[in-house]
């Protein structure tokens, strides 16, 4: 044992350490992307090869986000194709979003649980935000969406997102209701208002 561990504990210091650790751990932080060198190595190519296709790590990140977003969009479009009503389309959209998110947890986190990249904001390609527009149109059908439709659409998207996020992060938790039933209940509550 060293000399410090033999000294009596300082309760004030212990409290201060907890406070400082809380401050540091509770700060929002950007996701650390793998370096171009690490990506190239994992792809089995020289780092220079990666730079021949992407000028920067940010450009590659934008391509990854676009790819993942495209996969989610295809899932939603396939799910909505057979919908016979706007209510079925809303249900299908929400269920497809939730299913894709739980089956692609890393991609979901990258799209929706990291700080928006400034390039995405500049190009209006912020993943998920367009779902609010789509849901508002479906909620308003056959009329044009109102401010209330946008509020309900935002409430619906954020609620479904929360369900997915909790199912991703609360490992080992037994969920008493299947995801599909949870989504159906949630959509019905929001549609009833």
Image: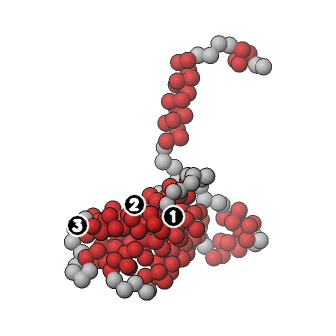
Mark toward the start of the polypeptide (2 vs 1) = 2
Q: CA distance from mark 1 to mark 3?
A: 29 Å
Q: Do tag 2 and tag 3 residues touch (Cβ < 8 Å)?
A: no
Label 2 crowd bin: few (<14), some (14–19), many (20+), radius 10 Å: some
Label 3 crowd bin: few (<14), some (14–19), many (20+), radius 10 Å: few
Residue sitting nearer the eye, 123 or 155: 155
x and y, in percent, of residue 155 in the image = 33, 62
Q: CA distance from mark 2 to mark 3?
A: 16 Å
User: At 53% across and 18% down in the image, what residue appears?
Assistant: 12
x and y, in percent, of residue 15 in the image = 52, 24
Q: Which residue has dot 1 on it? A: 178
Q: Do tag 2 and tag 1 residues touch (Cβ < 8 Å)?
A: no
User: At 71% across and 68% down in the image, what residue appears?
Assistant: 40
Mark toward the start of the polypeptide (2 vs 3) = 3
x and y, in percent, of residue 19 in the image = 50, 30
Label 1 crowd bin: few (<14), some (14–19), many (20+), radius 10 Å: few
Residue 159 vs residue 27: left or right?
A: left
Residue 114 vs residue 104: left or right?
A: left
**Vertical relation: 171 (above or below) 120:** above
How has the structure been colored for display? Answer: secondary structure
Q: Which residue has dot 2 on it? A: 159
For the C terminus, the quadrant is: bottom left
Q: Which residue has dot 3 on it? A: 148
Residue sitting nearer the eye, 60 or 15: 15
Q: CA distance from mark 2 to mark 1?
A: 16 Å
Residue sitting nearer the eye, 28 or 164: 164
Label 1 residue SS: loop
Single out the mark in the foreground, 2 or 1.
Answer: 1
């Amino acid at each position: 044992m060293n000399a410090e561990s033999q000294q009596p504990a300082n309760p004030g210091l212990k409290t201060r350490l907890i406070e400082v650790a809380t401050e540091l751990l509770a700060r929002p932080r950007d996701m650390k992307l793998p370096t171009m060198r690490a990506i190239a190595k994992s792809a089995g190519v020289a780092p220079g090869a990666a730079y021949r296709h992407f000028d920067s790590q940010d450009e590659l990140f934008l391509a990854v986000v676009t790819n993942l977003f495209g996969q989610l969009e295809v899932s939603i479009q396939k799910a909505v194709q057979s919908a016979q009503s706007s209510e079925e389309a809303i249900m299908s959209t929400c269920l497809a979003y939730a299913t894709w998110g739980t089956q692609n947890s890393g991609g979901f986190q990258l799209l929706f649980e990291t700080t928006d990249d400034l390039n995405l904001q500049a190009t209006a390609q912020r993943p998920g935000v367009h779902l609010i527009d789509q849901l508002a149109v479906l909620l308003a059908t056959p009329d044009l969406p109102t401010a209330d439709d946008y509020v309900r659409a935002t409430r619906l998207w954020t609620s479904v997102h929360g369900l997915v996020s909790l199912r991703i992060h609360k490992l080992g938790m037994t969920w008493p209701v299947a995801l599909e039933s949870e989504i159906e209940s949630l959509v019905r509550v929001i549609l009833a208002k």
